[in-house]
C-alpha cells in the first residue's frame, strides 16, 4: 500500500511529489513491495501515524526537497 501527495517546499517554493510505502503492523517484512516512481521523493521519516486495518497510516511525514535539500514537514490528508 502506498501513500503519495504533493508538497510545496517551505524554503524555495518548489512543488514536488512525495511517496511512501505503508507497512503492515505485525509483519517483519514488506508485502507487495512497490517500486518508487523515478520522479517522486521517498518519505524520510514518519513523524505521526495512526493504526488502521493493521496498517500504520502516516499523519505527518518528513521529506527532503529535491530542489534545495530542505527538510520539509508534511501533513498528510487522510481519506476514509
Ligand atoms: Zn526546496
Image (cartoon, helix red, strand yellow):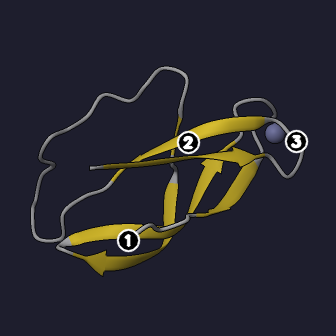
Find disc 1 in the rendering and name its residue.
Answer: 80
Q: Please name the residue that numbered disc 2 is placed on.
A: 18
Q: CA distance from mark 3 to mark 1?
A: 29 Å
User: Circle 3 sits on which residue?
Assistant: 13
Residue 64 rendering spot, x and y as whole percentages = 66, 44
Residue at (16% x, 49% y) in the render: 30
- Is 66 on the left-hand or right-hand side of 45? right
Which of the pair 77/44 is nearer the observer? Answer: 77
Q: Earlier in the sequence, mark 3 or mark 2?
A: 3
Q: Residues within 10 Å of mark 1 (few under 14, many from 20)?
A: few
Q: Do the residues bearing badges 3 and 1 touch, measured as CB atoms within 8 Å?
A: no
Secondary structure under tag 2 reads strand
Query: Is residue 47 shown above or below 70?
Result: below
Q: Nearer the viewer, mark 1 or mark 2?
A: 1
The picture places residue 48, in percent across and down from the top left corner, at 49, 76
How far apart are the two marked residues, 1 and 2, measured between alpha carbons? 20 Å
Q: Is mark 2 within 8 Å of ligand 1?
A: no
Residue at horizontal 54%, vertical 31%? 40
Q: CA distance from mark 3 to mark 2?
A: 15 Å
Figure quadrant of residue 73: bottom right
Amino acid at each position: 500500500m502506498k501513500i503519495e501527495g504533493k508538497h510545496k517546499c517551505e524554503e524555495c517554493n518548489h512543488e514536488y511529489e512525495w511517496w511512501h510505502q505503508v507497512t503492515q503492523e505485525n509483519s517483519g517484512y514488506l508485502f507487495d513491495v512497490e517500486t518508487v516512481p523515478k520522479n517522486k521523493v521517498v518519505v524520510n521519516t514518519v513523524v505521526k501515524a495512526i493504526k488502521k486495518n493493521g496498517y500504520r497510516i502516516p499523519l505527518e511525514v518528513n521529506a527532503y526537497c529535491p530542489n534545495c535539500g530542505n527538510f520539509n514537514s508534511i501533513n498528510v490528508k487522510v481519506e476514509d
